[in-house]
């Protein structure tokens, strides 16, 4: 590990520090929307309804099971934790000063595998095989990990994407950098269709006439192509202009975040003043299908599809993430999520607004709060996501009814201070293979366990690799059964999901059909040939299992098992 240097966003701990000025030094968009005087002018709920400093409040169905505080080169207040990526039992946690690798084989006791100190706001990571991509969105003196802050006016300054070889998780190796205009605020991986390359969609913004590599107009993204057999030859292959002329909103200068859904050739972009739906059939030439605006939105921040690809949840980063917008000063539809249905087909698909969601709890005026990064929870037959809200905490939202989203769980800490506003809270909160992982800007990595009958069955789905901005698809239940099922069962089409069911009889799954069983008892044999999916998780089979390609996990089978 390289020696750490003080983070560029470090704040003076003295009361009365100009918090907006310290955010401006961080090189992010925090200060751009910093609401001056808010700490003095805001109105909050009665003190007894808000947890005190560092106190934890939550619904009964969620609890914290582990926390790893910031350490080493990331220990300072100004070293902000950022995004997360997952691979096997490893969590890659970004920070403005680099990234950490954790082994979460035991989620109740994460182990530090390595820390890579490599400064450069904002350190969002993505992983693909043996490669890790790290976003850098602040001018550096050069592309090295020992670089220092530099002026954007200099031709010699650098910002963009760094690529690491992570084949040895304990000793990641920096192998390549790619400069991109205006750097890389966020980045999204999109695998090529031939499997030989991965594309990195680079989102950046904030052009300036005085910048050497970031001049206006900047209504574009940068697309980096990375050949998997030769990643050091990675290079920018396209810079598609998404909002030529007057098509983009006045405030649009690139995109803040793009979530790709490669299996459906779709992407959803939060592009400053616009919410955008793209066709990405041609990976190097995204085509806009639908573009929407919302007068209640200040700064389109991120997007999440439902698994069917029929909805998008967009978030509004009102206040740039630095402001206390979860107070009674702000309306419920300010700094909120907006849920859109995708209607039509093919080139005629459109985004249609359905409803808003904002956490129902009030914060103090010293807590920065805003709708931030979240992910789907693969619950059977429902659209449910978990989401970070900075110091507003963590919220689990059921948006199956797009027009009437409902919070079903929450977890939050009280303010970091009762005398000054410190940038903190949950930056990214994602569900992965049965647990919720949250990267808290100041408090470190949190692991939480959600215990709810609406979401427990999500443990039947697992991913070997997860970058939330590259949204994976999973088998969708066409039928969900619970309780006692009498007699044998023939699954002839679709995917039948058993959630706490008992089947008294043999089960046969026809070619192309699927079966997922969670917390269920199968009193009979299971046979499947050419099934789309067979997954038996946390269940008991009193009989044999004959299903090539099936997953049998954390289950007991009394008879013979043939899955390969």
Image (tube, grey):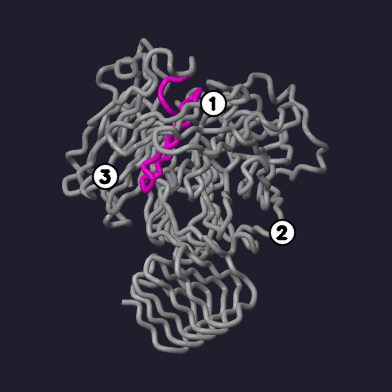
Q: Which residue lies under the disc numbered 1?
A: 299
Q: In front: mark 3 or mark 1?
A: 3
Q: Mark 2 or mark 1, which is nearer the start of the sequence?
A: 2
Measured from the top left, where is residue 517 in percent x and y?
Answer: 51, 71
Q: Earlier in the sequence, mark 3 or mark 2?
A: 2
As drawn, the label of residue 60 is 2
Query: With respect to residue 135, does 65 lie above or below?
Result: below
Q: Earlier in the sequence, mark 3 or mark 1?
A: 3
Residues rendered magenta in the picture:
252-274
Check disc 2: other Cα within 10 Å, few if <14, some if 14-19, many if 20+.
Answer: few
Q: Nearer the viewer, residue 62 or 56?
A: 62
Left or right of 175: which side holds 287?
right
- According to the picture, the residue beneath numbered tag 3 turns out to be 192
**Secondary structure beneath disc 3?**
loop
* In the rendered image, the vertical position of residue 323 relative to residue 56, given as above or below: above
Image spot of residue 154 (x, y percent)? 29, 16
Snapshot quadrant of residue 345: top left
């Amino acid at each position: 590990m390289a020696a750490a240097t003080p983070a560029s966003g470090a704040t003076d701990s003295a009361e009365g520090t100009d918090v907006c000025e310290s955010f401006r030094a961080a090189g992010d968009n925090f200060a751009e929307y910093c609401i001056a005087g808010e700490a003095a002018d805001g109105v909050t709920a009665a003190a007894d309804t808000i947890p005190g400093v560092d106190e934890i409040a939550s619904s009964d169905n969620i609890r914290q099971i582990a926390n790893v505080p910031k350490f080493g080169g990331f220990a300072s207040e100004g070293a902000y934790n950022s995004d997360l990526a997952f691979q096997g039992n490893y969590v890659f946690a970004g920070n403005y000063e680099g990234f950490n690798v954790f082994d979460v084989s035991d989620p109740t006791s994460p182990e530090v595998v390595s820390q890579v100190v490599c400064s450069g706001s904002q350190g969002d990571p993505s992983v693909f095989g043996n490669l890790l991509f790290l976003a850098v969105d602040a001018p550096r003196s050069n592309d090295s990990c020992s670089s220092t802050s530099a002026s954007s006016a200099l031709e010699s300054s650098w910002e963009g994407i760094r690529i690491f070889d992570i084949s040895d998780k304990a000793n990641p190796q920096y192998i390549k950098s790619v400069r991109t205009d205006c750097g890389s605020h966020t980045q999204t991986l999109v695998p090529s269709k031939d499997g030989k390359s991965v594309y990195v969609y680079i989102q950046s913004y904030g052009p300036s006439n005085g910048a050497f590599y970031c001049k206006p107009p900047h209504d574009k993204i940068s697309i980096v192509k990375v050949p998997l057999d030769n990643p050091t030859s990675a290079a920018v292959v396209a810079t598609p202009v998404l909002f030529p002329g007057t098509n983009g909103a006045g405030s649009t200068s690139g995109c803040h975040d793009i979530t790709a859904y490669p299996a459906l050739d779709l992407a959803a972009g939060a592009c400053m003043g616009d919410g955008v739906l793209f066709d990405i059939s041609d990976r190097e030439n995204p085509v806009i299908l639908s573009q929407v605006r919302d007068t209640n939105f200040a700064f389109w921040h991120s997007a999440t599809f439902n698994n069917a690809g029929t909805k998008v949840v967009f978030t509004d980063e009102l206040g740039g993430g630095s402001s206390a917008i979860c107070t009674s000063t702000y309306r419920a539809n300010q700094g909120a999520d907006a849920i859109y249905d995708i209607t039509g087909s093919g080139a005629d698909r459109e985004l249609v607004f359905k409803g808003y969601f904002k956490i129902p709890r009030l914060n103090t005026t010293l807590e920065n709060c805003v709708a931030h990064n979240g992910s789907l929870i693969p619950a059977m037959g429902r659209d449910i996501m978990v989401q970070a809200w900075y110091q507003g905490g963590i919220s689990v939202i059921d948006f199956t009814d797009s027009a009437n989203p409902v919070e079903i769980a929450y977890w939050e800490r009280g303010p970091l201070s009762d005398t000054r506003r410190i940038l903190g809270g949950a930056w990214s909160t994602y569900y992965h293979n049965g647990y919720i992982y949250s990267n808290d800007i100041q408090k470190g990595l949190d692991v939480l366990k959600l215990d709810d009958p609406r979401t427990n069955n999500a443990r039947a789905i697992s991913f070997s690799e997860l970058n939330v901005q590259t949204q994976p698809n999973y088998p969708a239940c066409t039928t969900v059964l619970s309780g006692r099922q009498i007699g044998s069962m023939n699954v002839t089409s679709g995917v039948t999901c058993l959630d706490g069911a008992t089947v008294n009889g043999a089960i046969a799954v026809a070619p192309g059909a699927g079966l997922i069983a969670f917390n269920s008892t199968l009193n009979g044999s299971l046979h499947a040939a050419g099934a789309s999916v067979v997954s038996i998780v946390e269940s008991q089979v009193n009989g044999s299992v004959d299903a090539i390609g099936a997953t049998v996990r954390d289950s007991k089978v009394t008879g013979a098992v043939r899955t390969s």
